[in-house]
Image (cartoon, rainbow, N blue to C red):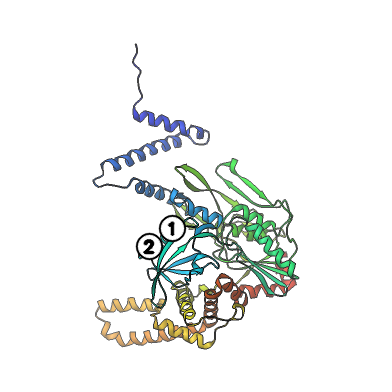
Amino acid sequence: MKKIKFLSRRKWLFLGIFLVLGTLAFREPVNRFFEIGKNIEIFTTIYKDVNNYYVDEVDPGKLMRTGLDAMLKTLDPYTNYIAESQIEEYRIKMTGRFGGIGANYHLQDDEVVISSLLEGFPAAKAGLKPGDKILSIDGKPTKGKKVDEVKQFIDGAPGSSVELKIEKNNGKKESLTIDRAEVKIPNVPYKGMIREDIGYVTLTTFTMDAGKNVATAIQDLKKDNKLKGLVFDLRGNGGGLLREAVNVSNIFVPKNEEIVSTRGKVKEWDKHFKTLNDPIDEEIPLVVLIDKNSASASEIVSGVIQDLDRGVLIGQKSFGKGLVQNTRDVGFKSKVKLTTAKYYIPSGRCIQSVNYRDGKPADISDSLRTEFKTKNGRSVYDGGGVMPDIKVKDVAENKLVDHLIKGHWIFKYAVNYAEKNASITNAKNFTLSDADFQDFKTYIKKEGYNYASKSEKVLERLEKKAEKENYDNAIKTDLETTRRLIAQEKEKELNAQKEVVIDLLEKEIAAMYYYEKGKIEIGLRNDAEIQEALKIFDDKPRYEGILKGSK
């Protein structure tokens, strides 16, 4: 009787790898096919040996996660491994629904602080306020935790409870138990009238039913008003579901119009997305607001409006994300979110503004950008986001204002203001006075406001250099004089930005009393892009000239 020869373990592994990858043989050259198999075996062997023989105990899951993250990091920021523990967070981003208390948070001086509340949800009902510090969650301290970690602890199944220890702005500490509820973040948080004939709708994310909700908001405005124009706000909208970008575009453009196409390595996956329904309003004059944080689905919609010459874009150049991600199940309730294609809008352009090489972004130079034409023959370009038809300077471009925002000085003053004032007038009529602006300056100075200008940073380096070279005593008086002059100029700069700062303060204070709706209503009154939109609606020849390419 002949003995059966068994393949060695290594040969079985190679055989299995080649069988699994065999279905891809018609796409992959043989040498690439071999490289994949070889490196999978090397990786498996190293992973096993480290777990078995490394001098200290290792966490196998953490070790593998580090390897996966490092591998995907060499591609682009949007290709990620989603572990079972992160699936719920991913679902929330796509649906806008989760179990929680209805609060948002940020890090402030290494402490987790409630930044805003959703009206009508458990956190607001329990008496929590923006500015409250969260000291512990179910007895576990939050010091040193990231916002995502804190949110993960606070969120949970609707009906369950969470115990929070908080510190109020006045230093008082208290513990309270809050029952979680299903939280649905509205993707259309506000609709209203800027004036009697101009409507306004804002869309914050392209989650489920975005198209339906925008359509309903516009129909409601048309029902109660004689609309002569509509402002559609996509500023700060980071995108979401591609199909909802098509649905939102369909509100303004005809049925059977191609909105976007996707093209990638796997040609069978290339798709063309067309509008399926009759539009809500194909004729109403339209202004779309965009900024540097308008990305992905927002850029599809704004790009479609521009490419089809359906409306005028106002604001700043958009983010420039022309990549499409799909998720694939990888077992054990985990997924990988993978960039599989680029998307192209009606003119044929792709607005992706960055190429990734070994995971590092490289801007696409102007010399490599290609010219395309809109429906009316206007020139537009690929590779750099969506460029607005009318540019408005971003207030945060000012370094001092940017520091006030990012350092939470606007927010801190608003919290302090709300503590001293039990109520304010309705948001539409709320204003701050010159005395309030002076109070703000006094407050931030008292609290240690420390904006360091570029000049001061240079001066600091000079002082250290002089000290090393023993010149510090010789130039001490000159340094102090220069520092005093810079301080005076900083005071002048802050005063020069008075209107911008007051606007930011009014918005933040209104949110303390009237939530997101109050913040938006203040914006409708003071917003530079809104004012520019009103001008273009009142200048019909200019509006039409922009769309025809003659203005």
Compare residues 100 and 312 and report the one nearer the observer.
100
Look at label 1 and name its amino acid.
Gln
Dot 2 alpha-carbon crowd within 10 angstroms: few under 14, some 14 to 19, many 20 or more: few
**Residue 150 vertical position relative to residue 173 in the rendered view, above or below:** above
Q: Is residue 33 visible?
A: yes
Image coordinates of residue 247 in percent, x first then y, are: 66, 55
Q: Residue at x 39, y 83 (%)?
A: 446
Compare residues 290 and 276 and report the one nearer the observer.
276
- Quadrant that contains the N terminus: top left
Image coordinates of residue 361 in percent, x first then y, are: 47, 57
Q: Are the residues at dot 1 and dot 2 in contact (C-beta closer than 8 Å)?
A: no
Query: Considering the numbered disc 2 on the image, is that residue within a helix, a strand or a loop?
Result: loop
Image coordinates of residue 101 in percent, x first then y, are: 49, 63
Look at label 2 and name its amino acid.
Lys
- The quadrant in which residue 529 appears is bottom right
Q: Report the residue marked by disc 1.
A: 152
- Quadrant that contains the C terminus: bottom right
Q: Is residue 393 visible?
A: no
Image coordinates of residue 290 in percent, x first then y, are: 60, 66
**Residue 517 vertical position relative to residue 212 in the rendered view, above or below:** below
Q: Report the residue marked by disc 2.
A: 145
Q: Which is more foreground, mark 1 or mark 2?
A: 1
**Residue 447 vertical position relative to residue 233 in the rendered view, above or below:** below
Compare residues 127 and 261 and report the one nearer the observer.
127
- The quadrant in which residue 167 appears is bottom left
Q: Tell me how far mark 1 sits from mark 2, CA to CA.
A: 11 Å
Q: Residue at x 60, y 59 (%)?
A: 299
